């Protein structure tokens, strides 16, 4: 039996990168008729506090928005378990057991925590200051991620390609646990790379589109109103090359990013998208086309999101039901883990 598992952080409004890189594939997977496969998706709220303290009200409303966000993208709670990570305390317990098996060296080799620390203003070149300021939670992020996956004995994890290194670490943690306690308890989970390529910032197409980017015009959020989408696409960085658009991520990163977005949203190949754009004479025409496609694609999501945000009772019901189903699996597995390590 397979168990497919993935989480997303409630660190801000979801953008089209999160949609194409994660939520869309969760939806597609959970709608595949595959007897014996269970789908578990949710909100990584424990991970969301690794980048610093936020007012409680802000985190609470981000968590709420995140659940409404994944539901508005069409995730169906009858076909998958939807829950908040923090509502299943067994994640944190397994995280501790795994932390005690993982070396600092292995964590130090992960690249994402350093780039996040740099984004937070911690300067890596001054080692002492860096260690003084950088929070341990940021370093331990991948162990918590491994615990999330392993507490359900998950077999498949759909993620964007920026998460490949963490998934590799999760596999080593699982192997390490199995070897240390002479067991095969944890399956070694496989990465299911989502088909869409990395979506880049509209303002700086050399870095990825990111929820926590303070410049809101760098992201198209799945809940943006049509006029907001139009304005952001109009302002998107492109280039001064005249004539028809073509795909060349090196020489034309801005234009290629927009083509990539079109390809992800319409599920067409890059070649097909470019062929359909042969009529385009200038950037204005190109950008108007991108805007039309995005406005049409996200109209339904935006309307559903607004409805869900008003229906706190329904959202709470989904979270509670998801939590109960997730906990049923997690408590059974943590009991086995406790036995294996002598903590029962
Ligand atoms: N720009 C992107 N293009 C494609 N996929 C992306 N993902 C994120 N950004 C892009 C995918 O979204 C999933 C969930 O991501 P996450 O919330 O756990 O953390 P993240 O990757 O760090 O996402 P953000 O938007 O960049 O958030 P912040 O700003 O909080 O760090 C993952 O599967 C990821 O691949």
Image: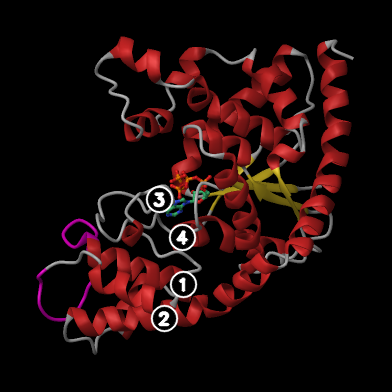
Is the residue 172 above or below the residue 301 in the image? Answer: above
Q: Which of the 4 quarters of the picture holds residue 301?
A: bottom right
Q: Residue shown at 77%/53% (left/top)?
A: 319
- Please check the rendered image and state whether residue 321 is part of the magenta-colored stretch, yes or no: no
Other-residue count near label 4 (Cα within 10 Å), few / some / many at <14 / 14–19 / ≥20: many
- The residue that mark 3 highlights is 210
Q: Label 1, label 3: how many angstroms apart (C-alpha)?
A: 18 Å
Residues rendered magenta in the picture: 240-253
Single out the mark in the foreground, 1 or 3. Answer: 3
Q: Is residue 279 left or right of residue 102?
A: left
Other-residue count near label 1 (Cα within 10 Å), few / some / many at <14 / 14–19 / ≥20: some
Q: Residue shown at 41%/81% (left/top)?
A: 293
The way the protein has been coloured in the rendering is secondary structure
Q: Residue shown at 36%/79% (left/top)?
A: 291
**Tags 3 and 4 touching, CB below 8 Å:** yes
Q: Which of the 4 quarters of the picture holds residue 59?
A: top right
Is the residue 176 above or below the residue 162 in the image? Answer: above
**Tags 1 and 2 touching, CB below 8 Å:** yes
Is residue 247 something one can see in this rendering? no
- The residue that mark 2 highlights is 293
Observer-nearest residue: 249 or 331?
Answer: 331
Q: Which of the 4 quarters of the picture holds residue 248?
A: bottom left
Asked whether mark 4 lies closer than 8 Å to ligand 1, one says yes
Asked whether mark 3 lies closer than 8 Å to ligand 1, one says yes
Other-residue count near label 2 (Cα within 10 Å), few / some / many at <14 / 14–19 / ≥20: some
Give me the disc on residue 15: 4
């Amino acid at each position: 039996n397979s168990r497919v598992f993935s989480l997303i952080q409630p660190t801000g409004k979801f953008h089209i990168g999160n949609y194409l890189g994660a939520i869309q594939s969760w939806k597609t997977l959970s709608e595949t008729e595959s007897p014996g496969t269970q789908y578990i998706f949710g909100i990584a709220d424990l991970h969301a506090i690794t980048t610093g303290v936020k007012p409680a009200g802000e985190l609470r409303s981000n968590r709420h928005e995140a659940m409404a966000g994944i539901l508005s993208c069409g995730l169906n709670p009858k076909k998958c378990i939807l829950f908040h990570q923090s509502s299943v305390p067994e994640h944190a317990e397994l995280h501790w057991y795994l932390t005690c098996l993982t070396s600092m060296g292995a964590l130090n080799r992960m690249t994402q925590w350093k780039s996040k620390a740099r984004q937070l203003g911690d300067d890596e070149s001054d080692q002492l200051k860096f260690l003084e300021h950088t929070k341990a939670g940021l370093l331990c992020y991948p162990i918590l991620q491994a615990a999330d996956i392993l507490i359900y004995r998950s077999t498949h994890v759909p993620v964007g390609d920026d998460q490949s290194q963490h998934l590799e670490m999760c596999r080593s943690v699982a192997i390490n646990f199995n070897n240390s306690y002479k067991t095969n308890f944890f399956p070694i989970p496989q990465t299911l790379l989502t088909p869409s390529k990395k979506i880049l910032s509209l303002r700086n197409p050399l870095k990825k589109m990111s929820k926590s980017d303070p410049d809101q015009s760098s992201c198209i959020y799945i809940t943006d109103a049509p006029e907001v989408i139009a304005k952001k696409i109009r302002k998107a960085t492109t280039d001064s090359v005249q004539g028809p658009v073509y795909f060349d991520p090196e020489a034309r990163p801005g234009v290629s990013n927009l083509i990539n977005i079109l390809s992800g949203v319409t599920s067409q190949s890059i070649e097909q998208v470019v062929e359909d754009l042969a009529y385009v004479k200038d950037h204005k025409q190109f950008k108007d086309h991108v805007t039309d496609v995005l406005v049409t694609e996200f109209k339904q999501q935006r309307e559903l999101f607004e409805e869900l945000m008003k229906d706190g009772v329904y959202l709470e019901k989904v979270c509670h039901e998801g939590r109960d189903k997730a906990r049923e699996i997690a408590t059974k597995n943590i009991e086995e883990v406790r036995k294996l390590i002598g903590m029962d």
